[in-house]
Image: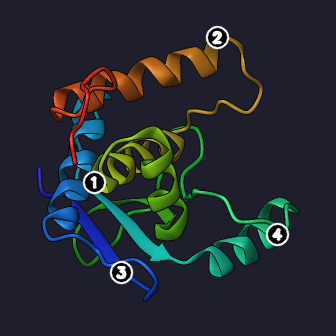
Amino acid sequence: MSNKVLITNSQKVVKVPSGLRILIRRACNAVLEYEHFDEPAEISVTFVDNAAIAELNNQYRNKPMPTDVLSFPLGENGVYDVDENNGCKMLGDIVISMERAQEQATLYGHPLQREVAFLTVHSMLHLLGYDHENGGLEAMRMREKEEAVLTQLGLPRTVSYTE
């Protein structure tokens, strides 16, 4: 399976740590494997600042404030367009505010890499059709899947990090 994870850095506020792009690719692949998505997939991940994500959040969700991550799924009910150039199913776009990710990493006391991995896994599940907006059982299932994938990546929530 050869997945394509296209990563773009469109911000200059937070330095992108070395190895972060590899971790994002690993996180995307781990979610696809965990969900038994056996066909080649294409995902776009873009790093932005708080101003850019606030603009997108306002435009698409009518919430004029920064958020940590936005997911833009391209498929519906498990049906995705296929990129004719590479045969990959186009799952969608993930937009991560590196500023917000840095703030949350500091708040939760773990490295930026772990926060960005969490946001990537969270968004990947959205691209595959999961939702947590209504809470309840679906939100709980989504959180369990997030934790299972992060544990598989060696980034469980229970680890105490030292900086």
The reply to whether residue 56 is visible in this rendering is yes
Q: Is mark 4 on a helix, strand or loop?
A: helix
Marks 4 and 1, how far apart in space? 27 Å
Q: What element carries label 2?
A: helix
Tell which residue pokes out farthest to the front in this image.
163
- Per the image, the residue denoted by label 3 is 8
Residue in the image at 71% along x and 13% along y: 136
Mark found first going from the N terminus, 4 or 3: 3
* Circle nearer the viewer, 3 or 1: 1
Marks 4 and 2, how far apart in space? 28 Å
The residue lying toward the viewer, choosing from 1 and 162, is: 162
Given the image, on which type of amino acid does mark 3 rest?
Thr
- Per the image, the residue denoted by label 1 is 113
Check residue 58 in the rendering and tell me which mark sits there, or answer none.
4
Q: Is mark 1 on a helix, strand or loop?
A: helix
In the image, 129: left or right of 154? right
Image height of 154 relative to 120, above or below: above
* Circle nearer the viewer, 4 or 1: 1
Marks 3 and 1, how far apart in space? 16 Å
- Per the image, the residue denoted by label 2 is 137
Marks 4 and 3, how far apart in space? 21 Å
